[in-house]
């Protein structure tokens, strides 16, 4: 009787001595040595894909989908006159909350374009413990793996010191006293939940959670910092956003921070 150890040894011996770059030959060798049940138990296609890609170093396309909470944040500069106009607008219309006059700001010309601010306009995933990931095959027929932030590899270990300098911390400031020439700031943060983004990449190995890492960032305000995810990496390579995923609006924050330390919300 041939032991499992002997079977594995013969597979290694066969593949190394009679290398044949034809996928059917690889399947034949694998099945000849009693691994048909292993193929079945492990999803067949995925196991063969892993073996095939490793042997032939074939680049395969994958899709990374990111889900969770996302924030679209905007920072506008305001003059003292604009701040007073907003206060008057709220009083005249009986608004208790600043967000109630959001559409009025453009209609009355107090702000030219809500979505074209002077300081920053950024959409990023919120690093608030809600983010999770799914890796699909190219046609999105199968989920290769799914994982959370805690399962990721370490950014600094993966990229090394030389590569780290290429990707500085992404930070935004909405604190008037920290920005020269700015007296007041209108800060808007629209929060959405659901899909965040799709990234397409290629690999000659089946991806695992530890192959991915992220770079964090933040938006500083007098009321606290919003932690964001700035960039995504696979095996040290920066992933470019391919498409946005569907999500649903859940919350909105609208505040004015003045140079005197006042908060209008």
Image (cartoon, rainbow, N blue to C red):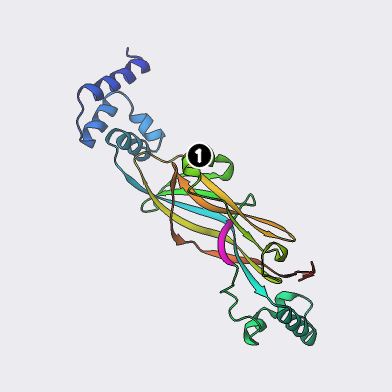
Q: Is residue 145 magenta?
A: no
Nearest the viewer among 42 and 110 is 110
What secondary structure do most residues of the magenta stretch adopt? strand
The answer to whether residue 155 is visible is yes
The structure residue drawn at horizontal position 19% and vertical position 30%, both measured from the top left corner, is 20
The answer to whether residue 154 is visible is no
Residue range in magenta is 120-125
Q: Is residue 124 magenta?
A: yes
188 with respect to 31 (left or right)? right
Q: Quadrant of residue 105?
A: bottom right
239 with respect to 34 (left or right)? right
35 with respect to 173 (left or right)? left
- Up-down relation of residue 62 to residue 191 (above or below): above
Q: Quadrant of residue 11?
A: top left
Q: Secondary structure at mark 1?
A: helix
**Residue 198, image x, y percentages:** 45, 56
- Up-down relation of residue 97 to residue 10 (above or below): below
**Residue 46, image x, y percentages:** 37, 39
Q: Residues within 10 Å of mark 1 (few under 14, many from 20)?
A: few
Q: Which residue is mark 1?
A: 161
């Amino acid at each position: 009787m041939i032991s499992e150890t002997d079977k594995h040894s013969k597979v290694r011996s066969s593949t190394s001595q009679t290398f044949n770059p034809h996928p059917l030959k690889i399947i034949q060798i694998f099945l000849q040595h009693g691994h048909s049940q292993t193929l079945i138990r492990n999803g067949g296609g995925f196991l063969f894909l892993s073996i095939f890609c490793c042997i032939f170093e074939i680049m395969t396309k994958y899709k990374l989908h990111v889900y969770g909470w996302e924030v679209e944040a905007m920072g506008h500069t305001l003059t003292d006159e604009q701040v007073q106009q907003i206060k008057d607008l709220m009083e005249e219309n009986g608004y208790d909350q600043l967000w109630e006059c959001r559409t009025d700001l453009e209609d009355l010309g107090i702000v030219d374009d809500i979505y074209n601010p002077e300081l920053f306009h950024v959409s990023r995933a919120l690093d608030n413990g809600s983010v999770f990931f799914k890796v699909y095959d190219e046609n999105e027929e199968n989920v290769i793996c799914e994982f959370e932030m805690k399962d990721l590899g370490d950014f600094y270990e993966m990229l090394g010191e030389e590569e780290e300098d290429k990707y500085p911390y992404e930070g935004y400031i909405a604190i008037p006293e920290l920005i020269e020439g700015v007296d007041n700031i209108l800060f808007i943060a629209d929060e959405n939940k659901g899909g965040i983004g799709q990234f397409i990449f290629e690999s000659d190995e089946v991806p695992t959670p530890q192959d991915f890492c992220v770079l964090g960032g933040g938006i500083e305000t007098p009321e606290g910092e919003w932690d964001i995810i700035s960039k995504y990496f696979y095996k040290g390579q920066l992933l470019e956003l391919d498409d946005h995923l569907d999500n649903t609006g859940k919350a909105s924050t609208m505040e004015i921070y003045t140079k005197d330390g006042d908060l209008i919300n």
